[in-house]
Image: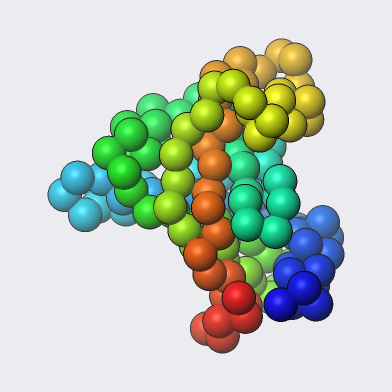
Amino acid sequence: MAAEFDLVRSKWEARQGAPVLTTVDENGRPNSIYFTIGGFFDDHTFFIADNFFHKTRKNILLGTQASVLFLTPDRDSFQIKGSIHLETEGKIFEAMKYINPHTLPGRAAAVVKIESIYSGAKRIL
């Protein structure tokens, strides 16, 4: 598992374009947003800065699942899937604040507990 995770981390570091976070509302309607501030906290945790969430914040508070989609320069796609919650203090929140520009609010860290990772249609974790 460590080798697969190292591959995903290296692909994340080389990603191209803005990644996409998708959540689902109480009626099952998906909501997708681009984000620019986020990353792996550890092998089980991914975080995204809540700078301007509105519908996304509401969906997270409802207990939605999440998917993070990103592309590599050679057009490979990766999806990180799992449960998501918000943190406004602690180590993950501080890690988010550290990389979040001071000009942005960084109200919370949206924390994805990684349950699976896909490369295209193939599950790799």
* Residue shown at 59% from the left, 21% from the top: 89
Q: How many marks?
A: 0
Q: Nearer the viewer, residue 41 or 77?
A: 41
* Above or below, 12 relative to 100: below
* Residue shown at 37% from the left, 39% from the top: 60
| Residue 74 visible here | no
Quadrant holding the N terminus: bottom right
Q: Nearer the viewer, residue 97 or 37?
A: 97
* Residue shown at 62% from the left, 69% from the top: 78
Residue that extends furthest to the bottom in the rendered view of this protein? 122
Task: Report x, y in % for residue 115.
Answer: 51, 64
115 lies left or right of 98: left
| Residue 33 visible here | yes
Q: Quadrant of residue 56?
A: top left
Task: Report x, y in % for residue 27.
Answer: 16, 49
* Above or below, 115 relative to 36: below
The colour scheme used to paint the residues is rainbow
* Above or below, 59 relative to 8: above
Task: Report x, y in % for residue 77.
Answer: 63, 72
* Residue shown at 60% from the left, 76% from the top: 125
Residue that extends furthest to the left in the rendered view of this protein? 27
Task: Report x, y in % for residue 93.
Answer: 64, 28
37 lies left or right of 27: right
